Image (tube, rainbow, N blue to C red):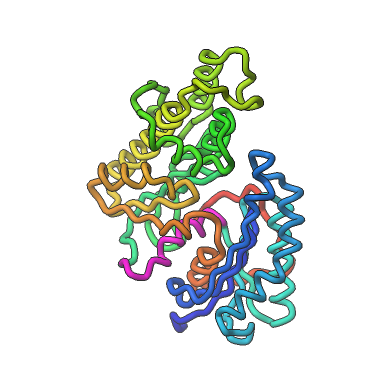
């Protein structure tokens, strides 16, 4: 079978409506993302029902614009890859139904793609860099997931561990709200921390020795306790902090604790499993201190996607679709979405 493919990817797992056309799993022809950040900012997080409604309103135009931008029609596409899970059930259904309709009308193969796997393949879209060398230790770190995965070959995964409570991105969002910062929390905390001292407050690190798991709920509680001790008259996270609270130091110390654990456990796994490289992907991989810490502390190459491919997008879905298509995957038109689908291979 020829290694050349052109895949249409569709992504609606959370609050981005996205479509992309990718050639050969590496070359992005078009990639459009319609963000819902402004819709959900007032709630401090994603409101599931509103997310699915927004997807319904935009999905047709996003797909049409993507094909137009790529200067191709469905007759020039080899398959349609769509996020099947994990994600918000209502949001996933919108993308899946769009993909099923296109597949039914065109006769093209339908490929259901794991969202976590797609994040990993965002790194294969960086054409100017050589493809990652196996075996790989992969850290998937986003708003809903913190997973440490051993990847021995394409489409072959062993989950080593994951978060036992809040994902790292979720912790950023919750702490940002405690500090009266904007949503999404990752960029807001990074910006606030620029003028802070990460050593000013010694927040706890949950190392969970003997496992590859993560936990950030204790760290979040420690930030809450610090805010209440300094301003006990406020209900943290509900009322905005008053002048005098060291927002920059709190943000910097919290961020440093998250980065320390993510990097430390990933490097330990890299040594244990003798990985040749590290892949870091997902929305939190856009965090600059995290990127700098990996580059400074790792003895093996660390690959991360460019900032515009860190957050949810459909190009990464199409990149996986290329591999799945060549491996012979063809899904029935009656497949269901899988909101809690684990990454296995």
Q: Nearer the viewer, residue 340 or 316?
A: 316
Where's residue 204, x and y in %? 42, 23
Q: Main secondary structure of the magenta part?
A: helix
Residue 146 magenta-highlighted: no
- In this rendering, the count of numbered labels is 0
Where's residue 227, x and y in %? 53, 19
Q: Nearer the viewer, residue 88 or 291?
A: 291
Where's residue 84, x and y in %? 64, 59
Q: Residue furthest bottom?
A: 75
Position of residue 123 relative to residue 41, above or below, is below
Q: Residue furthest front?
A: 243
**Which region shows up in magenta?**
115-129
Q: Nearer the viewer, residue 332 or 321?
A: 321
Residue 123 magenta-highlighted: yes
Q: Is residue 73 left or right of residue 284?
A: right
Where's residue 135, x and y in %? 33, 55
Q: Give the residue at x 42% y 47%.
A: 139
Q: Give the residue at x 65% y 25%.
A: 239
Q: Is residue 100 left or right of residue 71?
A: right
Q: Give the residue at x 35% y 28%.
A: 197
Position of residue 243 relative to residue 315, above or below, is above
Q: Quadrant of residue 193?
A: top left
């Amino acid at each position: 079978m020829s290694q050349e493919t052109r895949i249409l990817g569709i992504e609606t797992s959370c609050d981005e409506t996205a479509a992309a056309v990718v050639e050969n799993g590496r070359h992005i022809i078009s990639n459009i993302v319609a963000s819902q950040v402004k819709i959900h900012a007032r709630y401090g997080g994603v409101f599931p029902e509103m997310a699915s409604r927004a997807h319904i309103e935009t999905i047709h135009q996003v797909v049409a614009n993507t094909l137009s931008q790529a200067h191709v029609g469905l007759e020039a596409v080899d398959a349609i890859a769509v996020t099947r899970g994990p994600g918000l059930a209502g949001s996933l259904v919108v993308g899946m139904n769009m993909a099923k309709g296109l597949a039914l009308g065109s006769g093209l193969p339908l490929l259901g793609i794991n969202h976590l796997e797609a994040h990993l393949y965002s790194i294969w879209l960086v054409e100017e860099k050589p493809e990652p060398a196996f075996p790989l230790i992969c850290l998937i770190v986003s708003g809903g997931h913190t997973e440490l995965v051993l990847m021995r070959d394409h489409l072959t995964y062993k989950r080593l561990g994951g978060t036992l409570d809040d994902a790292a991105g979720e912790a950023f969002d919750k702490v940002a709200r405690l500090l009266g910062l904007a949503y999404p929390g990752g960029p807001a905390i990074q910006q606030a921390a620029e003028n802070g001292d990460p050593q000013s407050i010694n927040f706890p690190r949950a190392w969970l020795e003997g496992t590859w798991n993560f936990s950030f709920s204790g760290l979040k509680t420690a930030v809450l306790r610090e805010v209440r001790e300094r301003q006990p008259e406020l209900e943290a996270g509900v009322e905005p902090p008053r002048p005098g609270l060291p927002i920059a130091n709190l943000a910097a110390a919290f961020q440093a604790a998250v980065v320390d654990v993510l990097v430390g456990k990933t490097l330990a796994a890299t040594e244990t499993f003798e990985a040749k490289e590290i892949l870091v992907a997902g929305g939190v991989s856009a965090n600059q201190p995290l990127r700098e810490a990996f580059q400074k502390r790792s003895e093996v190459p660390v690959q991360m996607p460019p900032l515009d491919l860190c957050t949810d997008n459909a190009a990464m879905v199409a990149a996986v679709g290329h591999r799945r298509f060549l491996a012979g995957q063809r899904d029935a038109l009656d497949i269901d979405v899988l909101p809690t689908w684990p990454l296995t291979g």
